[in-house]
Image (cartoon, grey):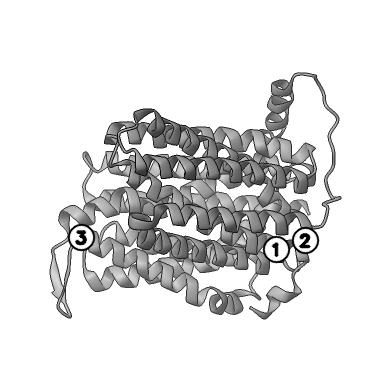
């Protein structure tokens, strides 16, 4: 971790600010939905989540384009300030709802504030990702993304722990603390982040914003190597997402409950155990694994890491033995620790310097496609046996690995 001090100032504060922002998000947003279950039915909440995710993606597409044509520092500061205002309004609404729990209008104001806050967060997220790209080079890129990967996982662990502990009885205090931290982050961002002069401002083709937006992403979609890279990435990520959409349900349904050290382990608890092991390994072994693989080429790290990753998760989808499941998640997590920072570093090689915000927003499509594929595994499980589903998950992961490898080989040849 000593190399952190050698990073550019933009990167150091970007990683720290991202840690606090993601911790706030993990500590508040999921638990607000749980809080709303006291007032709203499951169907409404399901539609709310679907609407929120859809608008978040649309806003990130627009925000990615805007972050490429405007100064990133001012863009991020402006939208973070708007988010602070919306978070403050949401906090006041929650406070008055606790005082007047029968106030129906106030409840729907909370829903609107929640959706708007997600839209604003989605708008400036690509600019954050582009900012880190602006400050990296080939020498420090893998180290930087290793730190970014580690802090992201740590923030999720810390955020969900804080939210789970305080949201039940201290939700308002949790939101007030989050607002205070976000204000400090925004002020620090404004003072510390250097003005990014690396932005290549674009000539506006038309007066119509949406025409310009369309042409911007039309050009991005013409980058065939990058599209194939994203498609391969989606295949790979679907293997891990199968743990949530398929393996989780299979564990809950078919896992034989037993006791170990006096603790009853059910299928649901087994899933929690696997998630816990994954989190612990990421937090404590990211840098140790990084030191082992730092001399490997990006391509070799991706090949080895992804192969371990897909082997581990595809075996989890098949096996129900407690000790084998633990071994599999360890193998999968080691693979993830090897390939994830290298995947992020490799992606930059396909992205033009003047379209980093746009490409960063569009790269979210790989996660969307991966989620759809993972949910498809669950649908197919009603028609195919367990062995075939597990083999299918493994094959799709291997296809993803081949696609990513081919794009890297092609790029190296062109260079």
Other-residue count near label 3 (Cα within 10 Å), few / some / many at <14 / 14–19 / ≥20: many
**Near-viewer residue (23 or 336):** 23
**Near-viewer residue (172 or 157):** 172
> x, y (%) of residue 27?
45, 56
Q: Quadrant of residue 273?
A: bottom left
Can residue 225 be seen here? The reply is: no
Other-residue count near label 1 (Cα within 10 Å), few / some / many at <14 / 14–19 / ≥20: some
Mark 3 vs mark 1, CA separation in Å: 41 Å
Q: Quarter holding the C terminus?
A: bottom right
Asked whether, in this view, residue 354 is left or right of residue 334, the answer is: right
Dot label at residue 392? none
SS at badge 2: helix
Q: Which residue is mark 3?
A: 267
Mark 3 vs mark 2, CA separation in Å: 48 Å
Q: Work out whether mark 1 precedes mark 2 in sequence or the reverse, and give the earlier one.
A: 1
Asked if the residue under mark 2 is in contact with the one under mark 1, i.e. CB atoms within 8 Å, the reply is yes
Of labels 3 and 1, the one closer to you = 1
Q: Work out whether mark 3 precedes mark 1 in sequence or the reverse, and give the earlier one.
A: 1
Residue 270's place in the image compared with 202, above or below, is below
Q: Which residue is mark 2?
A: 192
SS at badge 1: helix
Mark 1 vs mark 2, CA separation in Å: 8 Å
Can residue 378 be seen here? The reply is: yes
């Amino acid at each position: 971790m000593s190399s952190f001090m050698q990073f550019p100032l933009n990167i150091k504060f970007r990683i720290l600010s991202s840690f606090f922002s993601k911790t706030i998000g993990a500590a508040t947003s999921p638990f607000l939905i749980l809080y709303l279950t006291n007032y709203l039915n499951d169907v409404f909440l399901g539609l709310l989540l679907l609407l929120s995710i859809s608008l978040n993606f649309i806003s990130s597409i627009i925000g990615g384009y805007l972050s490429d044509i405007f100064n990133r520092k001012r863009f991020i500061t402006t939208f973070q300030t708007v988010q602070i205002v919306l978070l403050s309004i949401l906090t006041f609404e929650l406070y008055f709802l606790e005082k007047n729990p029968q106030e129906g209008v106030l409840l729907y104001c909370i829903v609107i504030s929640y959706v708007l806050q997600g839209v604003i967060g989605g708008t400036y997220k690509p600019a954050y990702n582009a900012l880190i790209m602006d400050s990296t080079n080939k020498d420090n890129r893998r180290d930087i993304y290793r730190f970014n990967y580690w802090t992201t996982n740590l923030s999720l662990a810390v955020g969900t722990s804080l939210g789970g502990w305080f949201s039940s009885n201290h939700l308002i205090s949790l939101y007030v603390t989050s607002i205070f931290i976000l204000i400090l982050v925004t002020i620090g961002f404004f003072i510390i982040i250097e003005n990014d002069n690396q932005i290549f401002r674009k000539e506006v083709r038309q007066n119509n914003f949406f025409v310009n937006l369309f042409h911007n992403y039309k050009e991005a979609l013409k980058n065939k190597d990058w599209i194939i890279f994203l498609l391969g990435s989606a295949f790979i990520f679907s293997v891990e997402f199968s743990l949530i959409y398929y393996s989780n349900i299979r564990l809950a349904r078919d896992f034989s409950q037993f006791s170990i050290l006096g603790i009853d382990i059910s299928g649901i608890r087994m899933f929690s155990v696997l998630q816990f092991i994954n989190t612990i390994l990421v937090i404590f072994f990211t840098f140790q694994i990084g030191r082992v693989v730092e001399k490997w080429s990006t391509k070799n790290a991706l090949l080895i890491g992804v192969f371990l990753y897909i082997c581990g998760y595809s075996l989890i989808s098949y096996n129900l033995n407690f000790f084998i499941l633990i071994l599999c998640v360890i193998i999968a997590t080691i693979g993830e620790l090897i390939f994830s920072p290298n995947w992020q570093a490799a992606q930059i090689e396909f992205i033009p310097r003047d379209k980093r915000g746009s490409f960063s927003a569009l790269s979210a499509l790989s996660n969307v496609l991966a989620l759809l594929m993972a949910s498809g595994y669950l649908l197919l499980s009603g028609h195919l046996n367990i062995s075939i589903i597990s083999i299918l998950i493994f094959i799709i992961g291997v296809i993803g690995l081949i696609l990513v490898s081919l794009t890297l080989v092609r790029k190296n040849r062109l260079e």
